Image (cartoon, grey):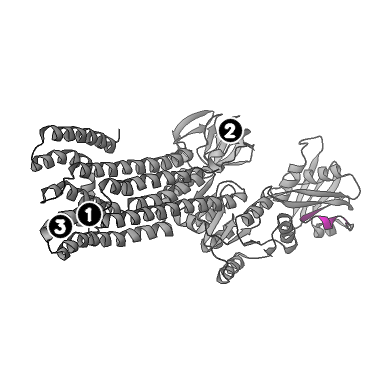
């Protein structure tokens, strides 16, 4: 059991015992103080130690000092002439202060536990393939290019590429995506995914410390190193507020008795009011609940596959006015696919069949798209004399017919005349031409695919009140305009180099489009991600450089998560504001009552510990994200 809880229980029992003994024996004031000092020191020793440590380190003005002065004064005030004994109240205040600390620790532990559970995705061992046998070794000892085996039900320990086997992977810990992802030979796999079906042999591409799971864990562990503006303000406020309150309490204790003309007779009354004033003024709820709210917001976002690197980015996300997207890999899949087939001298399946066979050995993304579109796999066709013409295409002999596949220049080399196409205007993408034995056979349009939720993402951002939604890309203008029109973005700039993107974003920020977020996934996006008020990287497909430069990482490829991140940030900031203003309002009211003698210790306890408990419970709501 937690030592603090044990202290509270023991002190509470002893307080009841001492209270009963005092009523029964009615000892002298000195003996009563000594008896009450026992439970007081049991529960209050850590607070007194923290207060003393602050004094010795030159930073005395904190809530521990306030609580120490107030409760010690209440413990000994009975020795003053005409003063009412307050020993039980002194122990009671310290007891409830520690109860409030337990509530804080519990809420913070729940936040950490929810993140730790989510991030407990990195196995410490790997099953390394050694010839025909396997042996279990520490994952940190596995080198790049080694082969590891992952069986059904196991978590992939290191990033790599599937050598043999096919399976489905549960990626929920990384991306929050509930649907399994199919993988096969040649598929890239990330550490932290759970293998659901077949046995996989994986060639390791990253060492343990550089794996996806390790990087995610490091991001979460370091998330609190960056304080939010609201949080920093609260801490600055507390350092100014505490000395003001201490000196105000001293003035309240001394000035009214001096003015009254009977200092000794009135000192105990005003001293008690000053001590009550100190108890009420302790800024526990303000100092504790705001950082806790931001920490809970980070935890709640991580449950949805959104990693926010610090509370300051929650603060900025909540105030976003502009969001700028990269195109490829962010709003589009970043993977080419066949968009349309326009045959000229044969039917569409035959045209695709010939093109896929010619491109079957190429590693080019367009070749991969053609092979992916042709699902029939191996057949009786013979393919030989495969020759690549650099920068133009590939030619090969398929079933004793020469087939040329490539761009317009490739068709000129083949001696084929391209037939103008009336349907091409309805599609935007890369045109792959095909000729057979010198005659033009038609063409296939390959295009990057728009993500299913891209249009929804833009709509959601506008619903959240984001005034400017723009797209910057290095792609051709006609491609960029087509994508933008389909997803509802009007502000588009295309054919940009990385430096151009950076200059465009800086220009927008100078024109008042701030705070501004940039969303990207590629290495060329890293400078812009670092420059924007908030850089948001797509973590599932994004490059290491982009993830490193970003302030927020979305662990799947859904741009709609940007709007969800804003929604979570605004809710978190709203809860933090409720805690800050609520605690200040209650304290001001009770401080006024305490100063004029209308608020006793019980009300002071509520104003301090009670408000803190309520604020901590309210901060816990940030973990619950719908």
Q: Nearer the viewer, mark 2 or mark 3?
A: 3
The segment highlighted magenta reads 421-432
Q: Is 102 in front, or is 454?
A: 102
Residue 118 at least partly seen: yes
User: Of residues 299 and 335, which is closer to you in this image?
Assistant: 299
| Residue 189 point in image, percent of width and height | 58, 41
Compared to 300, does 153 lie above or below? above
Mark 3 Cα-neighbour bin, 10 Å: few <14, some 14–19, many ≥20: some
- The image's mark for residue 200 is 2
Spatial distance from mark 1 to mark 3, Cα to Cα? 11 Å
Q: Which residue is mark 1?
A: 273
Around disc 1, counting alpha carbons within 10 Å, would you say few (fewer than 14), some (14 to 19), or many (20 or more)?
many
- Quarter holding the N terminus is top left
- Residue 432 on image: x %, y %: 79, 53
SS of the residue under disc 2: strand
Q: Residues within 10 Å of mark 2 (few under 14, many from 20)?
A: many
- Sequence-wise, the earlier of marks 1 and 3 is 3
Residue drawn at the location 73% of the way across and 42% of the way down: 372
What's the CA distance linking mark 2 and mark 1? 73 Å
- Quick one: which residue is furthest to the right in this view? 345
Residue 266 tag number: 3
């Amino acid at each position: 059991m937690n030592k603090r809880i044990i202290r509270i229980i023991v002190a509470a029992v002893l307080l009841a015992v001492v209270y009963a003994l005092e009523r029964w024996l009615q000892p002298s004031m000195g003996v009563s103080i000594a008896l009450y000092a026992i439970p007081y020191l049991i529960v209050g020793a850590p607070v007194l130690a923290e207060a003393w440590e602050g004094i010795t380190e030159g930073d005395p003005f904190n809530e521990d000092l306030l609580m120490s002065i107030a409760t010690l004064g209440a413990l000994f005030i009975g020795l003053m002439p005409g003063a009412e004994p307050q020993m039980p109240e002194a122990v009671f205040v310290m007891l409830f202060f520690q109860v409030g600390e337990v509530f804080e620790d519990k809420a913070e532990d729940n936040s950490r536990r929810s993140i730790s559970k989510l991030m407990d995705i990195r196995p410490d061992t790997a099953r390394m393939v050694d010839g025909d046998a396997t042996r279990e070794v520490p994952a940190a000892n596995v080198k790049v290019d080694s082969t590891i085996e992952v069986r059904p039900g196991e978590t992939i320990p290191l990033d790599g590429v599937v050598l043999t086997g096919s399976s489905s992977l549960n990626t929920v810990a990384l991306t929050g995506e509930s649907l399994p992802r199919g993988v096969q030979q040649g598929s890239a796999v990330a550490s932290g995914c759970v293998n659901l079906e077949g046995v996989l042999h994986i060639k390791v591409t990253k060492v343990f410390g550089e794996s996806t799971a390790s990087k995610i864990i490091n991001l979460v562990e370091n998330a609190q190193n960056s304080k939010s503006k609201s949080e920093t303000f609260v801490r600055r406020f507390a350092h100014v507020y505490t000395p003001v309150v201490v000196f105000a309490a001293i003035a309240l204790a001394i000035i009214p008795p001096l003015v009254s003309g009977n200092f000794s007779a009135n000192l105990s009354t005003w001293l008690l009011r000053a001590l009550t004033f100190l108890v009420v003024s302790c800024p526990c709820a303000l100092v504790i609940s705001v950082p806790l709210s931001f920490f809970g917001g980070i935890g709640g976002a991580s449950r949805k596959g959104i990693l926010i690197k610090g509370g300051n980015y929650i603060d900025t996300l909540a105030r976003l006015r502009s969001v700028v997207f990269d195109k490829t890999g962010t709003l589009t899949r970043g993977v080419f696919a066949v968009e349309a087939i326009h045959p000229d001298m044969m039917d569409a399946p035959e045209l695709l069949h010939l093109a896929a066979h010619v491109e079957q050995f190429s590693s080019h993304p367009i070749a991969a798209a053609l092979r992916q579109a042709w699902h029939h796999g191996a057949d009786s066709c013979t393919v030989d004399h495969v020759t690549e013409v650099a920068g133009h295409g590939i030619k090969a002999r398929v079933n004793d017919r020469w087939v040329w596949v490539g761009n317009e220049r490739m068709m000129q080399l083949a001696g084929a005349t391209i037939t103008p196409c009336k349907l091409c205007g309805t599609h935007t993408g890369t045109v792959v031409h095909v000729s057979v034995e010198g005659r033009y056979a038609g063409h296939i349009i390959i295009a990057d695919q728009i993500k299913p939720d891209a249009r929804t993402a833009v709509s959601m951002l506008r619903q959240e009140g984001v005034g400017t939604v723009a797209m910057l890309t290095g792609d051709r203008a006609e491609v960029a305009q087509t994508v933008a029109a389909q997803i509802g973005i009007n502000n588009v700039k295309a054919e940009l180099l990385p430096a151009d993107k950076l200059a465009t974003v800086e220009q927008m920020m100078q024109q008042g489009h701030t705070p501004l977020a940039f969303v990207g996934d590629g290495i060329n996006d890293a400078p812009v991600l670092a420059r924007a008020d908030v850089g948001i990287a797509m973590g599932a497909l994004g490059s290491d450089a982009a993830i490193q430069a970003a302030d927020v990482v979305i662990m799947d490829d859904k741009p709609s998560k940007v709007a969800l991140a804003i929604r979570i940030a605004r809710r978190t900031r709203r809860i933090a504001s409720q805690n800050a203003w609520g605690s200040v309002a209650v304290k001001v009211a009770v401080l006024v009552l305490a100063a004029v003698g209308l608020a006793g210790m019980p009300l002071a306890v509520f104003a301090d510990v009670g408000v803190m408990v309520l604020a901590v419970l309210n901060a816990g709501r940030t973990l619950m994200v719908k």
